[in-house]
Amino acid sequence: MTSRTGQLADFAANLALADIPADVRESIKLHLLDTIGCGLAGASSDLARRVLNSVEGEHARGPCPVLGTATSLAPAGAAFANAAAMNALDHDDGFEVDGKGMGHPGATLVAAALSGAAQAGSDGATLLTALAAAYEINGRVILSMQPSYGRFRQVYGVCQHQALGAAAAYGRLLGLNGAQMANAFGFAGTLAPVPSLRKYNWQARPLVSFKDFNAPAAEAGVRAVQFERAGLTGAADVLDGENGFWRMMGSDQFDPALLSDGLGDSWWARHASFKPYPTCRWMHTALESFEGVRTDRPLAPDAIEAIEVLTSAGLARDFMEVAPRTLVDAQFSLPFALASLALGRPKARWYADISSSDTARAALAARVWVRKDDEIDAQMSGETRRPAGQVRVMAFGRWFEGPRLIYPLGCLERPMAPEAVVAKFRANAACALSADAVERIEAAVLDLEHQSDVSALLALSAGRPPS
């Protein structure tokens, strides 16, 4: 195939494990582990439970386990429910290039891949290869259609494009060839949810429950492959041309070379990032700056008289809800997150109780204020869109300044150590599973290419003993 869409489809269908650089393979395993952990921690949230209750009413039972539950559903339903749980606590991974965040791939791609692995009875090498192809395609698609800053302010979608990555993962696991994959991409592009960042209810709280729309994108990717397998015809060369997917997603710019130039040699999947805090990524530099203050000078929560956040105009406007009413609102609240951090609350449990009855957190949140900083605002505005931040803390009548950070921890410029990612998985997974199950999942994922059958891994992740 000569189209860009066809080249990506051939890549997804024909990639071999040996073609994936060793560092990319190891990174993909960590992203799988991290995302499973996020799903296990999120499964017990009110949001994930409500989603599952709704999905169960519309989807048949099937072979695909829903993380942290006794439920197994048909592939699309399981992908939707798992993606919602993986993203529920906003602790799931990202894709960032030079500080600019462009989605949360893991919740969509891993959810679709787990459905595919369960349906096909896959081995670990195939699952690893499918995820590597999906992460690479996902990154190239969103990079190719980045809008100008003016258009970004008008219309943008955080994770809608991930429907194509989901189709790549699910389709590879079900054995699609290149032509079939290209047809599935055609469906994925036209089934993808519309870009909706500007309609998150920023001025009309509560915020939308799905926020990043990972779950609809996961379901769209799975359904796209199912429609191809049913013999239906999707949009041809959906990523190409003046009326391609980039135009459907509302962008005013398109660089087709980013879709396939260097494919298989240059790996954009290396820009997949990890999140150390269960909050919107744009808040992470401020949270880390606060931790920097306390590293240099340990401060008891009751010694903190005030926390001043230096940030962009957008965050000052939209991220200062002192008493958030919902799980999602709390994930976009600087006062809530800083108070939780100051009190040493386990990150996997930040949202177990967001009510005003937590008087210690409410009192600290009320002592957080924000100031627009011109330098930081310039980083976040314009084409860079880097979520810079800094925090100052008043204690004992003095101000203590945290570091000014341009790049958040967990991106390519400032990577999280593998040991830290594994520790995060353990803490998240422990919300739903026994210590033994957590240890067995970790061992299986970190040795994924040598697993002859991932059904045991899937059963453990669902909280059930392997058969």
Image (cartoon, rainbow, N blue to C red):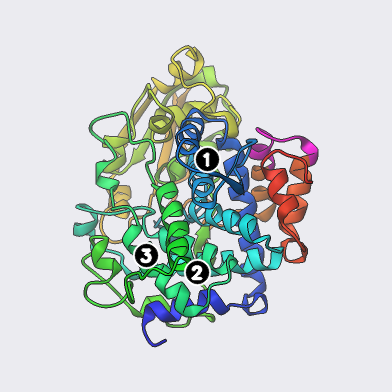
Residue at figure coordinates x 50%, y 37% from the top left: 56
Q: Residue at x 58, y 71 (%)?
A: 175
Judge whether residue 64 is colored magenta. no
State the separation of the CA atoms marked 1 and 2. 23 Å
Task: Using the numbered discs, state the Cα–Cα distance from disc 3 to disc 2 in whole angstroms.
Answer: 19 Å
Q: In this view, does 423 lie above or below 448?
A: above
Q: Distance between the residues labelled 1 and 3?
A: 25 Å
State whether residue 235 is above or below residue 282.
Answer: below
Categorize mark 2 by other alpha carbons within 10 Å: few (<14), some (14-19), many (20+).
many
Q: State the SS at label 1.
A: helix
Compared to residue 42, the image places residue 382 above or below, namely below
Left/right of residue 106 with respect to residue 437 in the rendered view: left
Q: Which of 140 and 68 is in front in this view?
A: 68
Q: What element carries label 3?
A: helix
- Magenta stretch? 426-436
Give the label on residue 136, or none: 2
Name the side, left or right, on which 457 lies relative to 374.
right
- Classify 10 Å Cα crowding around label 1: few (below 14), some (14-19), many (20 and above): many
Give me the disc on residue 187. Answer: 3
Q: Would you name the residue on which mark 1 appears?
A: 85
1 or 2: tag closer to the N-terminus: 1
The part of the image, by quadrant, that contains residue 42 is top right
Q: Earlier in the sequence, mark 1 or mark 3?
A: 1
Amino acid type of the residue tagged 2 in the rendering = Glu
Task: Identify residue type, mark 1.
Answer: Ala
Residue 68 spot, x, y in % from top left: 63, 37
Residue 97 visible in the snapshot: no
